[in-house]
Amino acid sequence: MTDYLDALETRDPLSRELALMTRLPQLVAQAQTASGWSAILAGVNAADIRSRAALAQLPVTRKSDLKDLQSASLPFGGLNNTPAHQLQRIFMSPGPIFDPEGRGQDWWRFARPLHAAGLRAGQLIQNCFSYHFTPAAFMVEGAAAKLGCVVLPAGIGQTEMQVQAMAELRPDAYIGTPSFLKIIIEKALEMGADISSVQTAVVGAEALPPALRKWLQEHGVPRVLQLYASADIGNIAYETMSDAQLNPGMVLDEDLILEIVRPGTGDLVAEGEVGEVVISSFNRDYPLLRFGTGDLSATLPGISPCGRSNTRIKGWMGRADQTTKVKGMFVHPSQVAEVVKRHPEIRKARLIVSGEMANDAMTLHCESDSPDQALRAAIVHSLRDVTKLRGDAVFVAAGSLANDGKVIDDLRKYD
């Protein structure tokens, strides 16, 4: 589609950056009024946090921290500005982890991806995200209300009824997981039902392999676009199309600040390098500052062919938490990062865990401009000092370590 939800989507990137940085001190000050953030940001002067460099000095609070934070201070770990009794909904994800939804139109900012997919007022959406405990279905509901779309709250399961609803109500779009859409199409073929009205699918909550996208398109759904969202943040980024062609990457939402950091650290990676997605979200009810999603991605250069000028990411590229056990002890990405920090000669490193169960071996593969035996010995000593485990180090050719965000690669055989 060539039209936009609002003028924010096509503004000059420098104007967007200036606007975000202008708002940043206010976000920090707002967050500090919540007890949890007050502790995390102790000693921080909100007025000083007005640039990306300043933001990068703040600690990363990771999704994996939420369970402990919330256990100590139910339900949201003191990260919420709006009291629980004033919210619209409280959700519960496995863990358990609790997530809030405040009051207000399109609270999850889902209208952008749905509008970019071509959904407009009066169109019928078959919403096949779960309405049970988790927020995805309500993210769609909020966006549909803003856009003026009609919603069939189908949820998940009951495949024959899903097919019957599509055949009789003729929805314009499916929204849900891509795997469930495949199941519905296969059931429709089995039943001989016509569900060809569904020309658009907006999918998320799981990976969309190219082969599955192609299969869905070959079976009657030409427009298959994925979005990237989380129960903590809402919409993060979304795919777009131009002249019926899918554009590369996913466009970042307008109300977020994105950072890509080395897994296990708060350190920014070079542009285009794969790392963990860290988000700061301007949400009055549930402000987030340097929130580590645990997801891997990388930025793309330039702006999208659709004309939306915000940063693009490659999409979801796996999980950043690569913690593994070696000889019965946990080894964390942050420990690998600590070893690398001790030796500036290391340009890039990856810990390879190999062998068989009960016969583990770990070797730090390092790219360096000045490899020598003295440096290798020093790295081996640091590896043992930091992890409390014996390991080796080897030097590899510059550029030979894949740009996939992996810090620890477990190659052990479990047969």
Image: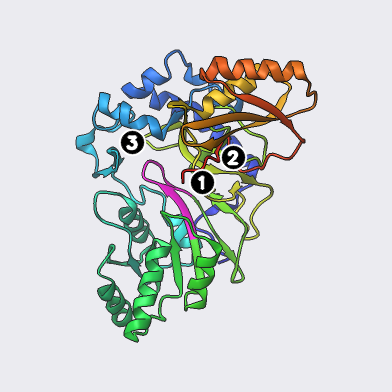
Residue 86 counted in the magenta span: no
Q: Earlier in the sequence, mark 2 or mark 1?
A: 1
Where does the image place residue 396, in percent across and percent down from the top left?
74, 34
Q: Which residue is drawn at 45% across and 12% down?
A: 43
Looking at the image, tell me whether mark 3 or mark 2 is earlier in sequence order: 3
Residue bearing the label numbered 3? 285
Residue for point 41% across, 64% down: 179
Residue 388 rendering spot, x and y as whole percentages: 51, 17
**Residue type for callout 3:** Asp
Q: Residues within 10 Å of mark 2 (few under 14, many from 20)?
A: many
Using the rendered view, name the quadrant where residue 122 is placed.
Answer: bottom left
Image quadrant in which you'd find residue 111: bottom left
Asked whether the viewer can see residue 298, the reply is yes
Near mark 3 (Cα within 10 A), the count class, few <14, some 14-19 or many ≥20, is many
Report the amino acid beneath label 2. Answer: Gly
Q: Which amino acid does label 1 sit on?
A: Gly
Main SS, magenta residues: strand
Left or right: 368 as drawn, with respect to 81: right
* Residue under label 1: 318
Cα–Cα span, label 2 and label 1: 9 Å
- Residue 312, how many percent across, how many down? 60, 49
Q: Is mark 3 on a helix, strand or loop?
A: loop
* View extreme (bottom): residue: 192
| Element type at mark 1 | loop
Q: Residue 405 carries which label?
A: 2
Relative to the observer, which residue lies in front, 15 or 218?
Answer: 218
* Span colored in magenta: 226-236
